[in-house]
Amino acid sequence: MSDLTSRLRGSIAPLVTPFQEDGTIDARTVRELIDHQVQAGSHGISVTGTTGEPGALTFDERLQMIDLGSDAVAGRLPFVPGTGTHQLPETIALTRRAAESGADAALVIVPYYARPTQDGLYAWYSEVAEAVDIPIIMYNIPSRTGVELAPKTVGRLWRDVPNIIGMKEASPDFAHANFVLRETGPDFLLYSGLEALCFPMLAIGGAGFISVTANLVPREIARMYEAVTEGRWEEARELHFRLLDLNDVVLTETNPTAVKWLMSRAGLIGPGLRAPLVPLSEDGQRRVRAAASSWGLVGEAR
């Protein structure tokens, strides 16, 4: 196992993008959130993934978040920004910026809306990876993109493209993850992108997780990974079941609506979301509050 693949394991926290009252990126709060993740024991930081509302950011704002995130992390943890879009030139440009900023790897989502074939996906990732000098972690999230990276396609890319090193797996079909690892083997870095599957992913040899819940309880999410690596499976299993309700409600009314509401109640960020997302409904607030109250996450609004 290389030093890089050894480092890129555990809980990589996918940060929300905080906004100021005027709607611009709140750079100071981004730095505070990253400091908090470092202090809480997270094993890595990601920005502008799904939780960071990348589709609602301008191209320049995404560049800003890559530079800001890299500067704030300052080498203390691995840094894995999301750089994928539905356009190949933009994806390559963002991924090159990640490399220039000193990121450890780039998280590249399956191109959305177009619904490409598996040959199209193979060509897409091959072109992105060959155009940049940075490790690539693919991002399979069919609920958002409308198409899924097939295990055989993942295996082809893993074997054929040297700087493709792993994938974030956000398919609700856990069998899919099993077939991916059968195609690739344990050196492939497979992360759970679905909260309820973080613990099961470790059981089949996954590298860790990129879980929105790490914005709320980063210490516990990191501890679940560490418990498994240290052989404390019962402790990890107990954490898995204790986190289950919270993991369920963080996806209420489209991520990151619920997690941003909870973080604003805790005074960590302002409540701002970018269109077309809207604030959490009253019914949603009741549901989220019920699951989050036992964690002490529902305080006074900022």
Image (tube, rainbow, N blue to C red):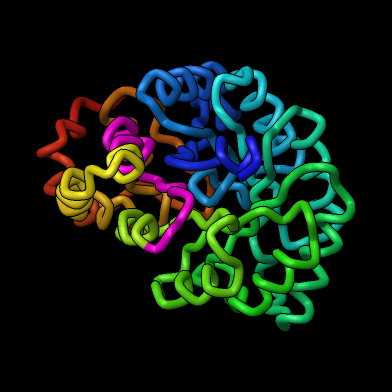
Q: Nearer the viewer, residue 2 or 87?
A: 2
Q: Is residue 1 above or below residue 191?
A: above
Q: Is residue 172 above or below residue 103?
A: below
Q: Is residue 136 above or below residue 2?
A: below
Q: Residue at x 32, y 61 (%)?
A: 200
Q: Residue at x 44, y 49 (%)?
A: 209
Q: Nearer the viewer, residue 68 or 238?
A: 238
Q: Is residue 115 visible?
A: yes
Q: Report the side of 274 relative to 213 (left or right).
A: right
* Residue range highlighted in magenta: 204-225
Does residue 18 show up magenta in the picture?
A: no
Q: Residue at x 70, y 47 (%)?
A: 83
Percent position of residue 242, x then y: 15, 48
**Can you tell which quarter of the image residue 75 is in?**
top right
Percent position of residue 66, x then y: 68, 32
Q: Residue at x 78, y 42 (%)?
A: 134
Q: Report the side of 30 relative to 285 (left or right).
A: right
Image quarter of the N terminus: top right
Percent position of residue 94, x then y: 78, 43
Does residue 224 show up magenta in the picture?
A: yes
Q: Nearer the viewer, residue 47 or 77?
A: 77
Q: Is residue 147 visible?
A: no
